[in-house]
Amino acid sequence: MTSRRPFLAALLTAAACAAAAPVAGAAGWTEPHSFEAAGGVTGFPEVAGGPDGAVDVLRFEQRGNDLALVNDSRSSSGTWSATTEVAGPAASLNQEYVTEVDDHGNVTVAWSGSSELWTATKTKSSGVWSTPTPVEPGVGNDTGPSLAPLPGGRMVAVWTNDDAGSYTVRLSVRDADGTGWGPVTELAQSDATGLNSVAAAVNRNGSGVAFWIANVGGQKALRAARFGAEAGSWEQADDITTMTGNAFHQGVDIASDGSATAVWIGDDIATAAYLPAGSSDWSAADQIGTGPELLASVGALPGGRFVATYQRMTSMYSATAIRRSFEPGAGGWGPEVNMTPNLGGMPSVHTNAAGDAFVSMLGANDGAQLPGVGGALLAHGASAWDSGLAVDEFSFNYNYGLVRGDLDGLGNGLVTWVDGSGERVNVAALDGSAPSLSGVSVPASAVSGVPVTMHASASDVWSDISYDWDFGDGRSAGGASASHTFAAGTYDVTVTATDESGNSASRSATIVVSDPPAPPDDDSDDDAPPVVNPPLIEARLAGRTVTLNAKLSLKKGKRCSGTVRATTAFGGRSYKTTLRLATKNGACRATGTIKLKKTPSLRTKLRVTVSGSQTKSRTLTTRRG
């Protein structure tokens, strides 16, 4: 999605100049992070979110009587870098600059200065900005650049050019993960006597669309053309509409299916046109607003849907932010949604490859006297927008820049703004992404009665994480590591990692818990029963106690030592006991008892078996008495 950075003098929203310190606001918003210029002013910020959650803030900073474009970066691990200069006065800086991040995390900035299109790129691998250079030096007058990320770590730049009255729209593609630019391809505008800034967008398939305003015969011709970013080739330009009044603040986006939507402010009314997938014919211009309006923007959503935003002036000194959604085949544009019914404005919509959407804006909570920086998130697959107002209730001076926003690849909304003093730029995030559970360790098996230790590790771009374990047996625990003792059975163990904004991620693992193995028969020579014949068993049942007395015949030359096992079953349970051999009354005997859980009835018969690894088994049926 690309929308043109608006001309600042066109912003009519009232703004005082008193400064207020940033304060944490609504749930989900991070505490603002601030940048100051030593001994001067700073302003005109832009923010760009990377695919991994990294953040780049670009801003102008006063250096004596000159200005420099500087960059402050935050890694996905949460560390802010020192301020880095991107470009100095020698690079012919212009406050009308644009910045974008590609799918590999390379950041590119572009501006028109001294009649040329200048760019600089910071690659993800180096973290260092390239020296600013013109894309096409010495060829006419370049104006109004737009950037759009291409798949594979590349970027396309689209701009307008006036070469001694010969007007063209041009494009060039930046190298993959590099800083150099390829050949320039132009689309002639032979009937134009002037061109406005251009807006451009590229979908994940590499298909692009550009949208600009041409002066033709005293009228405004709103034109669009598809382009193949991969080949750097233009299709024929089409006039969406012509008008005699004013047209400005245009934006365009293209969906993955190739459908596109263009928006603009025409005669102070938000207007849109739609290009169906597979078609070359734009729809008629559709006034989606009622006026007076400013600052139109549009973003593509999954399924060929689009969302448009614009600012409606309710008086000379107040405004609101409006949102409308478009669904092909469902009646077109849906009803207006006033996102800031109390007070607000400056809306701009941003989308990412995951299908999330974010609207950055000004907005005031009920009863608030001043607007605050805010935004609304729509996570992919969600049916409702999640709003957060306000990070900061403040007053500002639009001479130092507007509220700007972006959406990173993880679904976190970003906003940046300037304090009224012009000495501080702030940035904050609306945390919309769940923690990443990168490692969960749960053993596949365990033994009942023996403690089991489990571990989990997670990361979050913006906040600390808490862990909750559900062991699947009605018990739970907290912490990155947990210990639990299970009974025999199969359990689904689930760990949930939750960040400070309430976003959570869960993973489950199955653990099979078995009873400990029965102690083995003692087969050592010293403890082996020295018998040869099946034992003679006496067994009596009294209450719940079975009393056993077994007489064993010794092998010749053997002593009476070792053990045998006695077993019986009753009431669905098995009972076992170990009997040790001892000489009693001149005979080798094994004596002992078995305790039952329940008392058998008078007619119950029990089968008692006495056996050993070196003695033959014998079974006896006994009854009470």
Image (cartoon, rainbow, N blue to C red):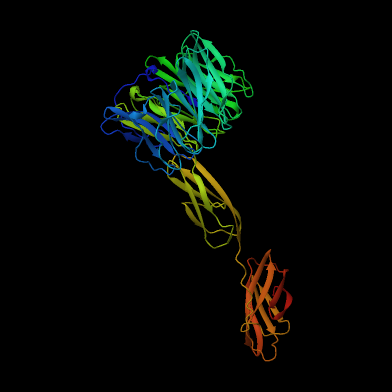
Q: Residue at x 60, y 66 (%)?
A: 516
Q: In this orientation, which residue lies closer to the viewer: 342 or 612? A: 342
Q: Can residue 517 be seen in this snapshot?
A: yes
| Among the 4 quarters of the image, the one containing residue 521 | bottom right
Q: Is residue 344 above or below residue 59?
A: above
Q: Can residue 340 be seen in this snapshot?
A: no
Quarter holding the C terminus? Answer: bottom right
In the rendered image, the residue lying farthest to the front is 138
Q: In this orientation, which residue lies closer to the viewer: 317 or 222? A: 222
Q: In this orientation, which residue lies closer to the viewer: 536 or 368? A: 368
Q: Is residue 524 left or right of residue 298?
A: right
**Image coordinates for residue 476, horizontal then vertical, percent:** 51, 51
Q: Is residue 342 left or right of residue 450?
A: left
Q: In this orientation, which residue lies closer to the viewer: 382 or 86? A: 86
| Among the 4 quarters of the image, the one containing residue 129 | top left
| Among the 4 quarters of the image, the one containing residue 620 | bottom right
**Image coordinates for residue 128, horizontal then vertical, percent:** 40, 40
